[in-house]
Image: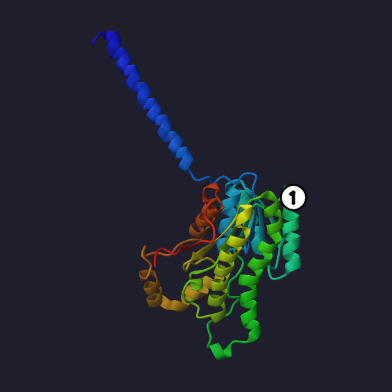
Amino acid sequence: MTAYERAFAGFAGFAFQHRRGLRRAEALRHWYINVNFTGKTVIVTGAAHGFGRAIAVAFARRGAQVWACDVLGDELRETEALCRTAGGSCRTMIVDVTDRAGVDACVAAASAASGRVDILVNNAGGVLGQVGRPLEQIMPEEWRAIFDVNVTGAFYCSQAVAPGMKAARGGRIVNISSGAGLGISLTGIQAYASAKAAQIGLTRQLAHELGPWGITVNNIAPGFVRSNPTTERQWESYGEEGQRALVDRIALKRLGTPDDIAYGVLFFASDQAGWITGQVLSIDGGK
């Protein structure tokens, strides 16, 4: 082989490797999950602490216009500050998700500010300070209160954003339920387990109803995470032996964090999750 032929062969080999590298890079770009939400408007309920705060900050860090809603004003301001520290944008509103007029006003304000709501995260819920008690001791108003904040609130918020999402021919709704909705509640609170199961049913129903407009509706069922004052009290109530037993039942042998839940929300809200709807993602370390 002449020097010219060796040089040509070397160049051809380089060109081949270069083209293969470009194809590999293109493939990586094709499969890369878009976690940039610049230009998107996101409403997060229950955003004063715990999962809601982590979700709000995660979206703000990735360019979204975040509207953080809760009934706890002081803690909401802390969430807003964390979003801004992360380099993002966040507005806050005091909203009781069981008040339909308040929910409508929040959605109207967010829509007026940016044109529409692209993503709704129904995170508001919880046990409202209740503890597990025998069935016969539960008062009707206690049952209704937990059901309202966990299910009716998600219904009102979804109802409020639906017209704008339909007009835009797209949107994302992510509901935060609980492992209690798929099994039993560690709290022993009957209304909580029932409400979270009902929210999962609402997720599946809305996924089929809103699907023709390109709107996806999905659900995340977190395992036990120390994320707010309520879960801290629950954790302490188990004692050292009960805490070890809880962790031992987890495949990964550790508790999760609020960020673990936020990452699941980011996936469901991403462009690559556009053909996923009506699904429940358990983020629980493995059971």
Determine the residue positioned at 66% across, 62% down. Answer: 158
Determine the residue positioned at 61% across, 81% down. Answer: 143
Q: How is the image coloured?
A: rainbow
Residue 123 drawn above or below residue 29: below
Q: Is residue 62 left or right of residue 156?
A: left
Determine the residue positioned at 65% across, 44% down. Answer: 39
In the rendered image, the quadrant that contains the C terminus is bottom left
Residue 103 drawn above or below residue 86: below
**How many residues crowd around disc 1 within 10 Å: few (fewer than 14), some, or many (20 or more)?**
few
In the foreground, 287 or 213? 213
In percent of width and height, residue 195 lies at 57, 74
In percent of width and height, residue 7 lies at 31, 13
Total numbered labels: 1
In percent of width and height, residue 130 lies at 58, 80
Which residue is farthest bottom? 136
Q: Secondary structure at mark 1?
A: helix
In percent of width and height, residue 167 lies at 70, 51
- Res. 202 in view: yes
In the foreground, 167 or 7? 167
Which residue is farthest front? 212
- Res. 172 in view: no
Judging by the rendered image, the residue that carries numbered circle 1 is: 113
Q: Is residue 287 left or right of residue 120?
A: left
Determine the residue positioned at 63% across, 49% down. Answer: 84
In the foreground, 217 or 56? 217
In the rendered image, the quadrant that contains the N terminus is top left
The amino acid pointed to by label 1 is: Ala
